[in-house]
Amino acid sequence: MEQLIFFAILLSLGYFFGRHAEKKHFKSILEREKHWLQLPTTSSKYVLTEDREINRCHLVNGSMVVSVDYFKRILAKLRIFFGGNVQSYETLIDRARREAVLRMKESCPGADQIINLRLETSSITKGKGKQIGSVEVLAYGTAVYFCN
């Protein structure tokens, strides 16, 4: 019985601290997205304004690795058993994608546009059961700088 209580306490602590950290990270993402809103980013291979001469362009990237906590893993296993969307992983992937794009934008200050944006997602497994331990998202594109 003591082990069950101990497990419940650890699970509760993980839930509340994880939830707090996730909310704090989402708040940070929203603030930074507002700051970088003026930098147009598109998946198109072509610049958005063709009437300006391009000075230079180069490859930029940003990546984010997010660990899957035990609470999300337990929720995902229950969802797999009962069926439906695995919402606990959806927020994790959303946070990682947005953070990777922000890091990419932060890597090219002064750029006028980022074109050909691509996102790659991969899971990092651990243990004998090949459980997902972390998720990596890589955002990359071409930063374009126009002549003045």
Image (cartoon, rainbow, N blue to C red):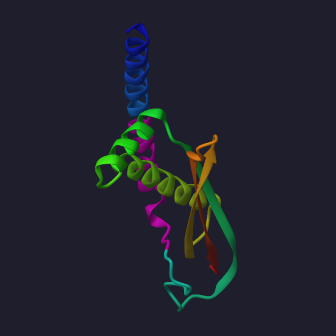
> Is residue 13 one of those drawn in magenta?
no
Depicted 119 relative to depicted 62: above or below: below
Residue situated in front as seen by the camera: 76 or 54: 76
Splitting the image into 4 quarters, where does residue 106 fall?
Answer: bottom right
Image: magenta residue range: 21-41
Depicted 132 relative to depicted 7: above or below: below
Residue 103: horizontal and vertical position, in percent? 58, 55
Q: State the residue at coordinates (63%, 40%).
A: 127
51 left or right of 90 in image: right
Residue 79 visible in the current orientation = yes
Q: State the residue at coordinates (59%, 51%).
A: 64
Q: Residue furthest top?
A: 2
> Is residue 32 one of those drawn in magenta?
yes
Q: How many marks?
A: 0
Residue situated in front as seen by the camera: 65 or 45: 65
Q: State the residue at coordinates (47%, 56%).
A: 98
Q: State the residue at coordinates (50%, 71%).
A: 41
| On-image quarter of the N terminus | top left
Residue situated in front as seen by the camera: 20 or 47: 20
Residue 111: horizontal and vertical position, in percent? 60, 69
Magenta stretch secondary structure, dominant: helix
Splitting the image into 4 quarters, where does residue 143 fall?
Answer: bottom right
Residue 113 visible in the current orientation = no
Residue 115: horizontal and vertical position, in percent? 56, 77
